Image (cartoon, helix red, strand yellow):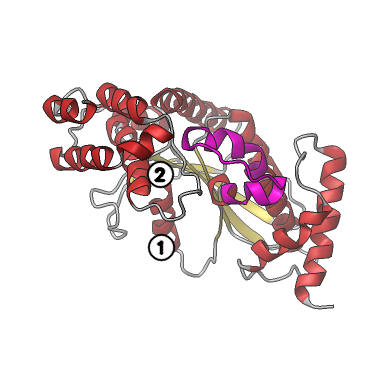
Amino acid sequence: MNNLDELTLKVKRIIESEKSINPDIRYLNASHAELIAQIITNYKLISASNNLIPPEAQMIFLGAPTGAGKDIFVRKILSENPDKNFVVLNMDMFRHYHNTITGENTRVSDKDFAVITNPTSYELYYIIQEVILREFAGTNVIVTGTMRDLSWVREIVNRYKNNSKTRYHVSLYTLAVPVTESAFSIFERYLNMVKYRGNPSEPLRYTDLEYYDDTIKKFLSTVRFFEDDYHNNPNARIFDDIRVYRRNKDIFDFEEDTLLFDTKSPVPETCAYTCISEIMHSHLSIDPNRMAKLLDIIESNSDYLKSQGLYETILSDLRNTLPNLDTNKEEDISK
């Protein structure tokens, strides 16, 4: 039996055991074990040894609203810790397996893509996490998310804190980004995917402004909850430490020092919540050239956006995000 076959059997047992106790595992079954084993194999993990003392490892939960730049910041963490071989987990990386898991071939619109794929991407993330925790002791992990759902974050952290095979040090890293920048970035990201899309049948993820605004509120509330817990429960903290970083001036400059707040600092000058809130609500002007580029993409891809039911939605969301939008240019597009 080769390593993939052995891992597949282990994954199969984990799926079966989790389905018996977790009602949220509805789509995955034993037939998906080989697919999950292949995904895990790509991480090139080392199988757990039978150590009498569980090894130490680090788990970082990187929390920030949609559009804040989490994926780029992960690259910064990796570049600063080349010896730790972090495994990076987020639900977005598993969304394209939705049809494979469900066996469906239904065309999903861009505006519905996230909602429809949430259950299957959650299940894949959950099972892969369980396999790592049970079979690959000592693995360093970075989990990213918007922290929109407090209970989901607590569930994740508790699984690492309570793991018997690895002694995890669990950290919360957050990104402080002006809301205008992160909101604009969600349009920029989506419209650039539209511009450079390959397979026309492959759905793209669009995040509307209403969902984004709700995420902002819940993100701040969640940060406050974990910071209060850190100070009020010194002997049983959910997170062992909390850090706040700002977005890089040059987002790809990994050498820039962007750390703003650290609970390990002897005397923090402020609190994490205040630090994040002040930056998020600070004034920021978007470069007119960036706005013009997006309006050009909307104009040249209007038929596609209309086919997704997003043409008017995006223009409306952009107006609400950017009061100084070039209205003349916008009116030309809307005709």
Left or right: where 215 falls relative to 290: right
**Residue 246 in view here:** no
Observer-nearest of 224 and 38:
38
Measuring 65% from the left and 60% from the top, which residue is drawn there? 56
**Residue identifier under label 2:** 265
Mark 1: few/some/many CA within 10 Å (<14, 14-19, 20+) = few
Mark 2 or 1: the one toward you: 1
- In space, the residues marked 2 and 1 are separated at their CA atoms by 19 Å
Q: Is residue 182 above or below residue 2?
A: above
Which of these two is toward me, 162 or 149?
A: 149
Instruction: Please give the residue where the numbered disc 1 appears in the rendered image.
Output: 80
Image coordinates for residue 53, horizontal then vertical, percent: 76, 63
Q: Quadrant of residue 115?
A: top right
Residue 59 screen position, x and y as percent: 58, 52
Callout 2 crowding tier (Cα within 10 Å): few <14, some 14–19, many ≥20: few
Is 139 placed left or right of 72 in the picture? Answer: right
SS assignment for the magenta stretch, majority: helix
Residue 130: image location, x then y, percent: 73, 52
Residue 200 placement, left or right of 319: right
The three-letter code of the residue at mark 2 reads Ser
Q: In x, y percent, where is residue 285?
A: 17, 33
Does residue 99 show up magenta in the picture?
yes
Q: Provide the residue span drawn in magenta.
A: 95-122
Report helix, strand or loop for mark 2: loop
